[in-house]
Image (tube, rainbow, N blue to C red):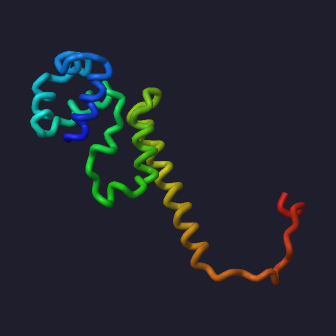
């Protein structure tokens, strides 16, 4: 957290304000900033508020496991988008997620099955563009 605190300090100095003003503008308690200066970690809400105030991305400041650095699950990403969409109710978002999950898994299975099937030869009737239309 020392690096995050240092980045916040740089932003504070750039704006020419005090730590007390940072706390007020970010809507965090001044004790949060004091604890961070002592090398302690802020709570999640405080860290999010400070990141928002400063415009800093938290990614460089958070240690992640190897698993967390992998690509997130597609359905999970879509689910978070649907559940934060103000035009959808929770039930609507759940319905969309369920539909997409079923379709996604079906398509993934079809792709796995297609990869495992032996290649076919062109001994059958040749399809032309006209025949497919």
Task: Tell me how many marks there are.
Answer: 0
Location of residue 59 in the rendering, given as x and y in whole percent from the top left corner: 34, 44
Image quadrant assignment for residue 4: top left
Q: On screen, 24 above or below 77?
A: above
Location of residue 53 in the rendering, given as x and y in whole percent from the top left corner: 31, 24
Image quadrant assignment for residue 88: top left
Q: Nearer the viewer, residue 105 or 36?
A: 36
Q: Nearer the viewer, residue 6 or 49?
A: 6
Q: On screen, 101 above or below 16?
A: below
Residue drawn where x is 19% and y is 40% of the image: 2
Residue drawn where x is 57% and y is 67% of the image: 110
Residue drawn where x is 44% and y is 50% of the image: 75
Q: On screen, 71 above or below 85?
A: below
- Most extreme residue toward the right is 130
The N terminus lies in which quarter of the figure? top left
Question: In the image, is 93 to the left or to the right of 125?
Answer: left
Image quadrant assignment for residue 91: top left
Location of residue 64 in the rendering, given as x and y in whole percent from the top left corner: 28, 53
Question: In the image, is 105 to the left or to the right of 5?
Answer: right
Question: In the image, is 74 to the left or to the right of 111?
Answer: left
The C terminus lies in which quarter of the figure? bottom right
Residue drawn where x is 46% and y is 52% of the image: 74
Location of residue 87 in the rendering, given as x and y in whole percent from the top left corner: 47, 27
Q: Nearer the viewer, residue 89 or 59?
A: 59
Question: In the image, is 61 to the left or to the right of 73?
Answer: left
């Amino acid at each position: 957290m020392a690096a995050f605190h240092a980045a916040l300090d740089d932003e504070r100095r750039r704006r020419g304000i005090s730590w007390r003003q940072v706390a007020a503008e970010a809507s965090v308690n001044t004790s949060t900033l004091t604890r961070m200066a002592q090398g302690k970690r802020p709570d999640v809400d405080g860290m999010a508020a400070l990141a928002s105030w400063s415009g800093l991305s938290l990614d460089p400041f958070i240690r992640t496991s190897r698993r967390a650095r992998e690509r997130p699950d597609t359905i999970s990403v879509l689910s978070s988008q649907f559940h934060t969409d103000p035009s959808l109710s929770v039930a609507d978002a759940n319905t969309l997620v369920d539909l997409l999950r079923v379709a996604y898994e079906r398509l993934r299975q079809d792709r796995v099955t297609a990869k495992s099937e032996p290649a076919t030869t062109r001994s059958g009737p040749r399809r032309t563009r006209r025949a497919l239309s």
